[in-house]
Image: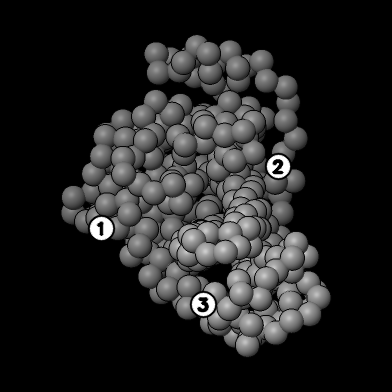
């Protein structure tokens, strides 16, 4: 069956990527304004501003004036930091990701069937074949990465190659190719850069405020330093959580779409269902950062979330329920956990998430 809205979905991902790039500095400037507005509203003390060397720069005035003055003073620095961070992500994303997972280039001579499967899938879609990598681990997983044709790559684990049959492996490769075709990899890397930048700056500011508040508490008026730290902590926490929620929401949606794309390419939903169930038995690639795990076809970390709010992937039961709507059937084999089979067979019909 054809995927509804494939071209629109791809265009939306490109628009979202561009929008996020614009939102990077805007969110940082907003957080900066919130910190100084709240600090001004709660009552600042001149000697605390002297501690940070801000009095000559920001002057005095209402909380709103203080917030606007902070934004006006530091916006070039904020945009500069955002630009540098984005450039690092753009030029080094493939190196960073493959280094984090321990992926090595796959040679055609050593993996002829894998190469042939991926090559044939690319030919059927009229796309340039991405680079192929393998992670040497018993875990079963795969991911797509890259932001353009020079950096696009599909990576699988050696455990996946050993445990999946030809049809299942083809279904997984088609799933990852769909991420590339729909520009999911580009959007996800942008969101990773987004959250990573906020996290990095939050840690820097938090540590500097801890030092400053410690110095402050040793002085005459400890309250101002403590208030500043609390305000900054709350503002940064809110911004960070919002960024995380945005990233997780994007990640969950893309997995449904990629599953549907795999079925559209291979016409074999049963193979993907079977592959997902095998992968679910051992998906945990060791020593991989949380930011990179969300790129996997299955993220075991998603099991630990608040009612799915912080899950990077839909549950396996929900994904299988959707695949069953596309004509797939749950295989009742030794590798199919009975609890999963029961959950999937009893699941209510779900609306197509890509319609």
Taking the spot 50% from the left edge, 73% from the top edge, the residue there is 86
- x and y percent of residue 268 in the render? 52, 35
Q: Position of residue 142 (x, y in %)?
A: 39, 45
Q: Is residue 25 above or below residue 348?
A: below
| Residue position marked by numbered label 2 in the rendering | 353
Q: Which mark is residue 105?
A: 1
Q: Is residue 29 above or below residue 104?
A: below
Residue 162 visible (yes or no): yes
Q: CA distance from mark 3 to mark 1?
A: 33 Å
Indicate the secondary structure of the residue bearing disc 3.
helix
The type of colouring in the image is one colour
In front: mark 3 or mark 1? 3
Q: Earlier in the sequence, mark 2 or mark 1?
A: 1
Q: Is residue 266 left or right of residue 106?
A: right
Cβ–Cβ below 8 Å for labels 3 and 1?
Answer: no
Check disc 3 and report the residue beneath it: 81
| Other-residue count near label 2 (Cα within 10 Å), few / some / many at <14 / 14–19 / ≥20 | few
Q: Residue at the spot x=64%, y=82% of the render? A: 55
Q: In the rendered image of this protein, does residue 93 appear above or below residue 71?
A: above
Screen quadrant of the N terminus = top right
Q: Nearer the observer, disc 3 or disc 2?
A: 3
Which of the 4 image quadrants contains residue 16? Answer: bottom right
Q: CA distance from mark 3 to mark 2?
A: 36 Å
The residue shown at (53%, 52%) is: 178
Per the model, the C-alpha gap separating discs 2 and 1 is: 34 Å
Q: Residue furthest front?
A: 220
Q: Return the disc, 3 or 1, that comes first in the chain's sequence.
A: 3
- Please give the name of the residue rendered at 78% of the width and 72% of the height, measured from the top-left corner: 63
Report the front residue among 26 and 298.
26
């Amino acid at each position: 069956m054809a995927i509804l809205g494939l071209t629109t979905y791809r265009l939306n991902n490109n628009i979202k990527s561009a929008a996020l790039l614009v939102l990077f500095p805007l969110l940082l400037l907003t957080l900066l304004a919130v910190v100084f507005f709240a600090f001004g509203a709660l009552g600042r003390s001149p000697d605390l501003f002297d501690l940070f060397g801000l009095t000559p720069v920001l002057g005095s005035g209402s909380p709103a004036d203080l917030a606007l003055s902070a934004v006006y003073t530091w916006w070039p620095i904020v945009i500069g930091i955002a630009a540098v961070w984005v450039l690092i992500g753009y030029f080094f994303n493939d190196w960073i990701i493959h280094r984090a997972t321990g992926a090595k280039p796959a040679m055609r001579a050593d993996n002829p069937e894998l190469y042939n499967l991926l090559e044939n899938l690319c030919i059927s879609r009229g796309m340039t074949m991405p680079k192929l990598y393998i992670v040497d681990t018993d875990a079963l997983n795969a991911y797509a990465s890259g932001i353009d044709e020079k950096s696009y790559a599909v990576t699988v684990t050696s455990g996946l190659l050993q445990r999946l049959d030809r049809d299942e492996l083809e279904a997984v490769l088609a799933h990852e190719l769909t991420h590339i075709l729909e520009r999911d990899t580009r959007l996800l890397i942008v969101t990773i850069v987004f959250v990573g930048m906020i996290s990095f700056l939050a840690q820097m500011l938090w540590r500097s405020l801890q030092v400053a508040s410690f110095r402050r508490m040793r002085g005459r008026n400890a309250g101002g330093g403590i208030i500043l730290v609390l305000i900054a902590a709350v503002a940064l926490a809110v911004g960070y959580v919002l960024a995380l929620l945005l990233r997780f929401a994007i990640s969950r949606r893309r997995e449904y779409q990629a599953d549907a794309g795999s079925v559209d390419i291979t016409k074999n939903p049963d193979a993907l269902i079977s592959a997902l169930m095998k992968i679910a038995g051992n998906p945990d690639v060791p020593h991989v950062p949380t930011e990179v795990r969300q790129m996997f076809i299955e993220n075991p970390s998603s099991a630990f979330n608040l009612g799915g709010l912080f899950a990077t992937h839909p549950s396996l039961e929900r994904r299988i329920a959707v695949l069953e709507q596309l004509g797939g059937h749950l295989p009742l084999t030794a590798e199919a956990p009975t609890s999963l089979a029961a959950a999937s067979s009893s699941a209510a019909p779900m609306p197509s998430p890509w319609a």
